[in-house]
Amino acid sequence: MYILGISAYYHNSAAALIHNGVVIAAAEEERFTRIKFDSGFPHNAVAFCLKKAGIKLADVAAVVYYEKPLLKFDRIAENFSRTGIAGYWAFVKYMPLWSGQKLLMRSVLNKELRRYLIKGEKLPKLAFSNHHLSHAASAYYCSPYSKAAILTIDGVGEWATASISIGEGNKITTLKELHYPHSVGMLYSAFTQFLGFEVNSGEYKLMGLAPYGDKNSEECQTFITLIYEHLITLNSDGSIKLNLEYFDFPKGFSTANIKQFEKLFGIQQRVGRLLPRIAILQWLYNGY
């Protein structure tokens, strides 16, 4: 049985083909279009996977999309209802996109997939997976383990921003989730923005630069104290709670509240510079 997995319409669109539990082929769309972080439907990646296996789309039993758009919309709509007038312009900006495409994702995907069919062939079954379950599955099922603990951390999926799961045999059971707006990924992206890099792009640069800092320096210790006292609350179970006074993403804007960050750390946002404040990076590298 063949199963085709697809991610699209956010960043790094990709496709992967599985045959009886074995990955036959996988590719990101940007490798074909040469567009960095290409977010369009992965036509080239899908075609590559099918060609690699020597099959047609009609031979595929199911196509699985990497998240659940309706559940994600539920989170976005509730978020805007909480922010009120503060999130008005972001609401005006994003709602047409949701009403025109993302709420109709099943129709959008089926329309794109029909390009691979010839007359008389039927579309495969289309299913939608939970975002963090997709992350967990990509790690666990490709590992050599028959039983493993699985930790996922990112910005946000539908509601979850982090999850702890157990993989055993062919089943994954989620034990606990951290929910939006409290997110380690959003915290990291806020520093990415504050230090002059692009969100959802420059985070890897922070990881690369962080080891050059000195965590024992007086400056670094000062930043650590400020972060714990003002930005986050670290709970006994390892989860965090963000002080939303310092973040703009619930309003649909940039991740960090730059004025608040500048006031807290006593430094201005670095815009378009290559060398960020190493002391803050060191804290991010060593973890909270």
Image (tube, grey):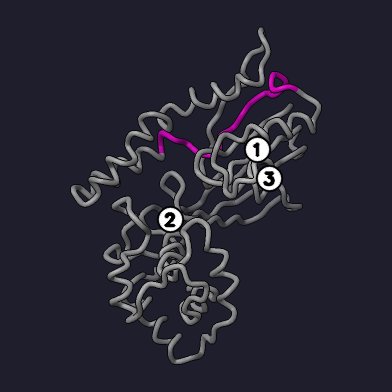
Provide residue 61's location: percent of width, then percent of height: 67, 23
Which residue type does callout 1 highlight?
Answer: Ala
Residue in the image at 50% along x and 43% along y: 10
* Coordinates of residue 74 in the picture (x, y in percent): 35, 38
Residue 178 — which label?
2
Extreme residue toward the left, this view = 85
- Under circle 2, the secondary element is strand
Residue 34's spot in the image, x, y percent?
65, 45
The magenta segment is: 56-71
Which residue is painted at 54% across and 70% down in the image? 206
Element on which disc 3 rests: helix
Indicate the amino acid at tag 2: Leu
On screen, residue 207 versus residue 104, left or right, reads: right
Mark 3 or 1, closer to the camera: 3
Q: Are marks 3 and 2 in contact (CB under 8 Å)?
A: no
Q: In whole angstroms, how far apart are the C-alphas of marks 3 and 1? A: 12 Å
Q: Nearer the viewer, residue 168 or 234?
A: 234
Q: Are marks 2 and 1 in contact (CB under 8 Å)?
A: no
Check disc 3 and give the amino acid type. Answer: Arg
**Residue identifier under label 3:** 31
What is the distance, in whole Å, between disc 3 and disc 2 at their CAs?
A: 33 Å
Q: Cα distance, mark 2 to mark 1?
A: 28 Å
Residue to which mark 1 is pinned: 15
For marks 3 and 1, the one nearer the N-term is 1
Q: Quadrant of residue 264?
A: bottom left
Residue 109 is one of the magenta-drawn residues: no
Q: First in sequence: mark 3 or mark 2?
A: 3
